[in-house]
């Protein structure tokens, strides 16, 4: 059912952007109930649901997360939208510069965001640029110039809107609607909340995460634990770690460190953790 726009469903992003949660299908019990079709067992307690949701995400059994859907309306600079639309498994609709004259909204970063090209990361920003305030003024002037030209082409010369936008900068804002299931959102957020993602899309991803998790707190907690904050070792890294720390964990210290079993960390998960430590040689087989 479409949601009423409320403060909880909307976040301002950058200088003129926003994300607005417009619709939700399903809730935190949906992945559990979709998964239960496999076994036919009846509806279960919250604790059992949590255990299953965590198990499913931990083991990448992802289809039960495809049954819940979230739709957002987003206003973002074209530069951000170009990155966003690479996520091909979402469904999109965007406002059209052929049908309407686009709103005079542009993105200019804060001066503190304007940096030198990073030396090590070819895609990223490095140290702050001392001339940043001048560049911000320059960008604003150029945006203003384009806006005047765009407006004159349409309003004074009656040039078709589809061509009047020819020189539109990627700082111009556009608005779109994006619909995806929970798995789509997890994949998007994993890539776009990461440190390596460009700041301008990262702030949108962070806003989406905050809004979406209100509706699926258990699923997003599991996503955070097993995807966002998880660390994967390559085969070579695991071997190196094993050489450095071979058999340094005793069975006793392992057992003592384990928390009491709970839906957030079951006995089964503790055993899986034990197998991982044995696999990389930190713990020897009991
Ligand atoms: C930090 C960063 C830098 C990037 N830099 C660049 C860049 O310089 N140039 C550039 O072009 N892109 C760049 N990208 C975009 C990137 O290559 C992906 O296109 C984008 O992140 C979308 O990811 P995806 O394909 O997994 O997502 P989706 O398109 O949503 O796909 C989701 C999943 O569906 C499956 N899938 C979808 N389509 C196919 C298919 N055709 N064949 C097989 N499996 C499919 C895959 O498992 C995929 O992971 C960058 C992305 C990031 C996060």
Image (tube, rainbow, N blue to C red):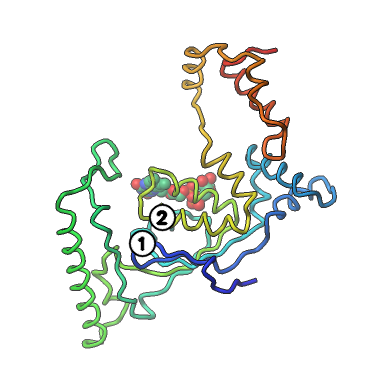
Residue 253 locus on image (x, y percent): 63, 17
- Residue at 53% from the left image edge and 62% from the top image edge: 91
Residue 99 in the image: above or below residue 3 = below
Q: Quadrant of the N terminus?
A: bottom right
Relative to residue 189, is residue 147 depicted above or below?
Answer: below
Among the two numbered marks 1 and 2 on one chain, the one whose residue lies closer to the N terminus: 1
Q: Is residue 82 left or right of residue 46?
A: left
Quarter of the image where the C terminus is located: top right
Q: Are marks 1 and 2 in contact (CB under 8 Å)?
A: yes
Q: Which quarter of the figure has residue 123?
A: top left
Label placed on residue 260 = none
Q: Dot 2 surroundings within 10 Å: few (below 14), some, or many (20 or more)?
A: some
- Left or right, 278 with respect to 35, comes to left
Q: Pointer 1: what residue? A: 14
Q: What residue is shown with label 2?
A: 203
Residue depicted at x 61% and y 44%: 222
């Amino acid at each position: 059912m479409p949601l009423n726009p409320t403060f909880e469903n909307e976040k301002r992003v950058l200088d003129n952007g926003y994300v607005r949660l417009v619709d939700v299908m399903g809730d935190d019990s949906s992945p559990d109930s979709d998964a239960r079709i496999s076994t036919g067992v009846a509806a279960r307690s919250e604790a059992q649901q949590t255990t299953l949701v965590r198990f499913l995400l931990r083991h990448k059994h992802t289809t039960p997360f495809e049954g819940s859907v979230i739709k957002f309306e987003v206003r973002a600079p074209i530069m951000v939208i170009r990155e966003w639309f690479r996520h091909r498994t979402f469904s999109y609709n965007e406002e059209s510069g052929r049908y309407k004259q686009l709103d005079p909204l542009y993105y200019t970063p804060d001066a503190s965001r304007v940096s030198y090209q990073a030396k090590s990361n070819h895609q990223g920003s490095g140290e702050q640029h001392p001339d940043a305030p001048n560049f911000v003024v320059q960008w604003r002037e150029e945006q203003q110039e384009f806006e005047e030209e765009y407006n004159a082409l349409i309003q004074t010369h009656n040039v078709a809107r589809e061509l009047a936008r020819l020189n539109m900068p990627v700082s111009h804002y556009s608005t779109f609607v994006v619909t995806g299931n929970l798995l789509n959102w997890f994949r998007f957020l994993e890539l776009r909340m990461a440190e390596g993602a460009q700041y301008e899309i990262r702030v949108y991803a962070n806003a989406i995460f905050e809004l979406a998790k209100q509706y699926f707190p258990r699923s997003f907690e599991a996503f955070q634990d097993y995807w966002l904050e998880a660390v994967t070792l390559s085969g070579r890294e695991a071997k190196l770690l094993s050489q450095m720390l071979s058999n340094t964990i005793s069975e006793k210290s392992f057992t003592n460190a384990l928390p009491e079993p709970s839906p957030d960390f079951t006995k089964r998960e503790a055993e899986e953790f034990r197998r991982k430590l044995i696999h990389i040689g930190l713990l020897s087989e009991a």
